[in-house]
Amino acid sequence: MPFAAVGSSLKITADETQALKSLPVAAQITAKKAIQGSVADLGRLVDFISMLNSSRYCCLAPIFHATLSSIQVPNYINPKTIPTIMRAKWALVGLVKISTVTPSTYDDMDDPVTKYLVRRWDDAYPWMRFFARNCLPPPYDVSVSPPRPDLCNVFDAAKLCITPLSLICTKSEEGRHLLRSSVSVQHYVAQLWILIGNLKGDVLQGDPGTTSEGLISMLRASFALTNHVCVSESEDPNKIILPLSNYIQAAGGVKPVVFTLLRYIRRITRDAAAVEAPRSWTPSDRSVNQLHLYTDASCREQLIRQGSIRTVVGAITEILPKILVQASKEMDFHPQLGLAGRQNVLWSGYSYIASAIRDAEDGVTAACQAIDAGVLQILEKGVVCPPHADRRDHPTRGRMGDIELLFLLATFFMYHRVVESIFRHWIRMQSAPMQKREIRDKGLGVALELVLTSTIDAMDHRSVEPINFHEYRCSGPGCPMCTSEFVSKKRRCSGCLVSIYCSEKCQRAAWRNGHKRWCQVLRCTVGPWGSRDIRTSLQVIAGFENSEISGMAKDVETRVREAQQQFPAFRDRLVLMLDMSVYPPEVHVLPVHKLEQFPGNDPIWPEIADEIRQRSESPPKGYMFSVVKVNLGKPKVTLFSPSTALRMAFEGQYFSDDEISVDEDEIDDSKTPGHEDLDHGSESLDDG
């Protein structure tokens, strides 16, 4: 059937016109009328596109492209612009449908999405923004009804605005770079992301063939991937991508991004948990993975503060039974839906929890949130799943999988607040009904046993009497007063941040009695920033320090000999470092000047080392003293030995039966370094 070029509304090439002759006669007639400007026939043309013979209908794409090229986006909606809007709607729907149903072929250089959408982005994108602005509810108020449902209902508008982005993210590398590099596109995606995250079921009514709740679940899952791609790194390191801050600003700031992201996690988890059989459950959703992308300084702490770790732990708890259920041998070894594939979803959640703890400025708070949310209980349930990582035909564990998360948590068991969370964990375990489980994942089972043993050790170290004596008793020599009995404001030494005094008299007496020598040592025991978490945890850290060094006695001797051979000029200036920022802890022996974040060149250390040797019942052999490296999250701090510092600095007050009494008349009122004037040399105790 011939197509007359004269009088046509649209301009298509002779080759494109010739290609239309391969269509059925009814489709050719409809195409001719669509080219001549019939809006109704343009809509009917879309109905011809189907999965059957999908490649045959690719010849309709030039009509849709020509339609979009021939019209401009109107500034207003009125009776004159409605036909133009409807033509754009059907043309965009047609391109999306062709890109969806047309498979990629090996002899085709460009995939359909790149050819029909990305390469004609300048024609399609303005109309996508138009329908988003005029036919979708506002991003921050989804209760507002769309202004023109007669032009395009919310269901069709969502497909027009979101489906092209989802297709680009999954099928076009060129398109993915477009999303990452365009300010306008990122602004558009950010606003849509907020909108979809707030959509409720009653917004999408009248969806043909799909329930509104099902459509919303599909939109959330697909757009989570779009968001992930939009702000992730490019496949090509040479291609420039926009900073994450640009996307956050476009979405309205940190708080909307954080709240919407956590809402995505909760709602997608609910949808996944509602699936009855694992066969229909897909692990392709990347909503948890998105959390990795929001770990820059602007969002990381806010996410943790708003409960992101708790949210992810809750999500894992909810979907864990679905993931670990075993269906059949054929199903369990399926490359995408099998047990190994589903385990990767768990590991993505574990990976976020680990990265949040590891990269946080306050990793102690993050670790407490994870334990309080029940991450140890989840990992105990995970041992029932066979370890497919041991098989050659399955992928290895994630970079931060379950075992890695366990070992990271164990590096925080030395902190007072974390031990309190551990106490609550064991109380919950005692009240929960006992369930005997078969341990199929032997590797996870062994790691879990080691870490749970460390939790018990932490509680034991925390329970040693007197508990944190330096926090609850006046450090004045011979003073029996507890902090709860202080009448006046409590005084904390501003030099060491450890000693507490009930009065100016006790503070001056302590300085004269030996605190002058040990003040700087105690300051090095709480770290360069004087972390409160370290200060209140010195007893637990000291307990781990003693037990670990004793347990590795042979390894310590070996390390000392190696260091003496490696550093012969510093044989008498070696220091033992217990690295508890890793699990299991490691020991190293090195010259004092090589210590990080520690005043090793200060002349006080040889003098202190000599006193340690004289006053210790079993003086260390081969090294001056020990230090401890601890993990605070992103920062890692090297501390002077808490065990040594507490024992030496408070020996007269707390470790001897003969308490020292000081005559008030003998107190030297001269000003001393670090304790000059008590109004300036001490701090009021507002957190003790």
Image: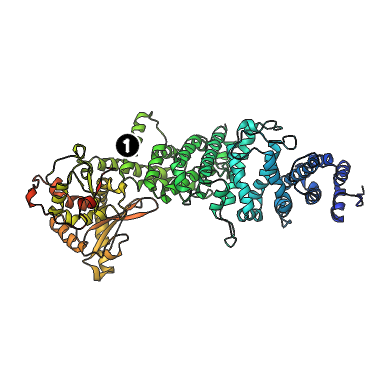
Residue found 17% across the figure and 49% down from its top:
507
Vertical order, 520 against 220 (above or below): below
Q: Residue pushed farthest bottom?
A: 569
Instruction: Please indicate whether residue 305 sits to the left or right of residue 460 in the image.
Output: right
Q: In the rendered picture of this protein, how many numbered marks are placed on residues?
A: 1
Instruction: Please indicate whether residue 173 sits to the left or right of residue 14 in the image.
Output: left
Q: Secondary structure at mark 1?
A: helix
Q: Nearer the viewer, residue 285 or 516?
A: 516
Q: Nearer the viewer, residue 135 or 108?
A: 135
Q: Quadrant of residue 436?
A: top left
Residue 5: x %, y % from top left: 90, 52
Q: Quadrant of residue 283?
A: top right
Residue found 30% across the figure and 62% down from its top:
595
Q: Residue 617, can we see it?
A: no
Residue 65: x %, y % from top left: 78, 50
Vertical order, 209 against 131 (above or below): above
> What amino acid is labelled 1 in the image?
Phe
Q: Which residue is mark 1?
A: 423
Instruction: Please indicate whether residue 605 sits to the left or right of residue 533 in the image.
Output: left
Vertical order, 607 against 50 (above or below): below
Image quarter of the C terminus: top left
> Would you call the spot at circle 1 few (<14 residues within 10 Å), some (14-19), or many (20 or more)?
some
Q: Nearer the viewer, residue 356 or 142?
A: 142
Residue 133: x %, y % from top left: 67, 42
Residue 4: x %, y % from top left: 92, 50
Q: Residue 182, can we see it?
A: yes
Q: How is the image coloured?
A: rainbow
Q: Quadrant of residue 148?
A: top right
Instruction: Please indicate whether residue 439 sits to the left or right of residue 62 in the image.
Output: left
